[in-house]
Amino acid sequence: MHLAYLVTAAIVLLIFVHDHGINSYERARFLDMLHGTAHKPFVCRVLAPATIRLVSSALPSSIQERINHQLIEIPFVRKTTSNMMWEPGHLTEYGVAMLLMYLALLGFAYSIRYLYDTFFWGTLRNTVPLVALAGLPVMFFCNYLYDCTTLFLFTLGLGLMAREKWLPFLIHLQPVVRQQGNHYPADFRLCPGAPEGAILDAGSRATPDLCRSQSIAVAGVRRESGDNGRIPSPRP
């Protein structure tokens, strides 16, 4: 089943980046997101871009240039990246972004199973996450760089709340705030190219809304599950 998760996540990711792409919307271009110069509110989503920047910066520029040059020499890569509007000189950053989104999709699948185990039991614990993961492409409309990490963090938060693991939940809120953007000076250091005031305290305003929506979702499931908080899965 773990292999099925790996394969399905890879297929979903390929659909995600190829269908509408992560560089097709002019207000949230890939490089603009990375350097903090995209339009609001997209520029406020700093977690995924900052992570990509930090990982990419760990590689010397000479190595990045060599990787970009070797990749663009491959006809299939050159044609594919051209169709997806990927800049040839930044394929390393795109590769890091692909890895981050892939890990987030896997995290979403396992978070679904973690949440499912809180209320149900039975053999469907392995099937439900796979169905949820495979069903994502029908919901793709405008594919943003931060969509996969947002999906993963929100689902993980639901699972932590459902199990009343409040300390891990509070720790989990920190990357959630980073995902939505905030006013901490660290964010400006991560995005030095951002115009003054571009990264607002959106995270501070969005976090209570996120917690409320997660609480409503968990409360709704608990209400349907009865006093013991668990619903047996259908039996044959």
Image (cartoon, rainbow, N blue to C red):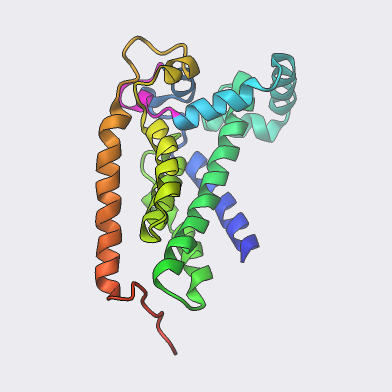
Rendered residue at 56%/22% (across/down) = 87
Q: Residue 90's spot in the image, x, y percent? A: 60, 21
Q: Quadrant of residue 45?
A: top left
**Span of residues in magenta:** 37-46
State how many labels appear. Answer: 0
User: What residue is rendered at 41% in x and 13% in y?
Assistant: 194
Compared with 27, 128 (above or below) is below
Along the line of sight, the residue nearer the viewer: 121 or 138: 121
Q: Is residue 90 left or right of residue 39?
A: right
Q: Is residue 87 visible?
A: yes
Image: 212 above or below 8: above
* Foreground residue among 117 and 161: 161
Residue farthest to the bottom?
Answer: 236
In the rendered view, tell whether residue 176 sits above or below residue 67: below
Percent from the top left, x then y, of residue 48? 48, 32
Q: Residue furthest front?
A: 167
Q: Residue at x 43, y 54 (%)?
A: 136
* Image spot of residue 137 (x, y percent): 44, 52
Residue 164: x and y in percent read 38, 58
The structure residue drawn at horizontal position 30% and vertical position 38%, both measured from the top left corner, is 207
